[in-house]
Image: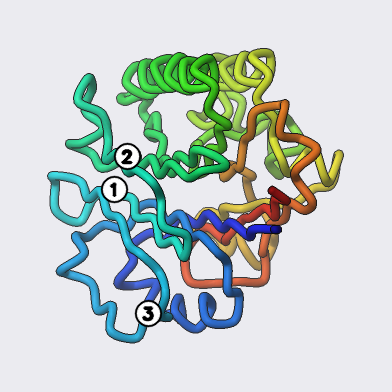
Amino acid sequence: MTLRLISWNLAGMRAAIKKGLFDFMEKDKADIYCFQEVKAKADQVPLLDCPRGYRQFWNPAAKAGYSGVATFTKIEPKSVIIGDRDNDWDDEGRVIITKFDEFTLLNVYFPNGQRDLGRLDFKMKFYNYFLKYIDDLRDRGEKVIFCGDVNTAHTEIDLARPKDNAKTSGFLPIERAWMDKLVAHNWTDTYRLINNNKIEYSWWSQRSGARPKNVGWRIDYFFIDKKLESKITDAFILTDVYGSDHCPIGIEIKL
């Protein structure tokens, strides 16, 4: 059995629906969609035309119109965890964990450090807690996949202008060092696993016509436990799909 998983920061689900989200889902037919930055609660979203067959799990932020994640899945999970009581994931709607027979999937919207670096400490605290969390899941024998907007480009080939952004949150040495640590802990970037040094981006600034010029960043990822590498049959970025300042990314995994 091969499953198709898609992750997409929507920059607002209501706006994305108006721009064709459900049409995309109807054609794409993924088994699981992990959406970030939905910026709404389920009862605020016009879901009537959503393709049928998806179970929906939502973790909205306490603050209206902010953050939030949602997972739509054709496969019924055996358990679902919304956020975590030990930190403020619940308040900002940053994590949904769906556990299936074959794997555990974390849909995550990682914090942004902000241009003035005002949330960098919060972001790094979240990063460090999260790495310990997924390491602990793996140590308990769970086969872990996580995806979402990580809000950091890992290497120089992951953004169009690395030198210009060396002091910008999203490409700071401390943030990239955490990505290095993630890989050192045997977590695999599926896009690089399949595509080697291919250059594609998943996010473009809305200023200065960045997307038509392809001046972008690859900050959206699917990571897996290194032991699952042989199960990944494809990893891709759907750069021709519009509807947000991000585009969808995905993997296909054979179980």
Residue at 52%, 17% in the rendered image: 135
Q: Position of residue 177 (x, y in %)?
A: 61, 15
Which amino acid does the dot numbered 3 rest on? Cys
Q: Identify residue for label 2.
A: 94
Q: Are marks 1 and 2 in contact (CB under 8 Å)?
A: yes
Distance (Cα) linking label 3 and label 2: 23 Å
- Image quarter of the N terminus: bottom right
- x, y (%) of residue 80? 32, 43
89 relative position to 141: left or right: left
Looking at the image, tell me whether mark 3 or mark 1 is earlier in sequence order: 3
- Helix, strand or loop at mark 2: loop
Q: CA distance from mark 1 to mark 2?
A: 7 Å
**On screen, residue 4 above or below 172:** below
> Three-letter amino acid code at disc 2?
Arg
Q: How is the image coloured?
A: rainbow
Q: Dot 3 corresponds to which residue?
A: 50
Sequence-wise, the earlier of marks 1 and 2 is 1
Instruction: Say which residue appears at 50% left-offset and 83% top-offset.
Output: 23
Few, some or many residues within 10 Å of mark 3 (<14, 14–19, 20+): some
Q: 112 or 56, which lies in front? A: 56
Foreground residue among 38 and 115: 38
Residue 11 in percent (x, y) is at 38, 59
Closer to the chain start, of discs 3 and 2, is 3
Q: Label for residue 67?
A: 1
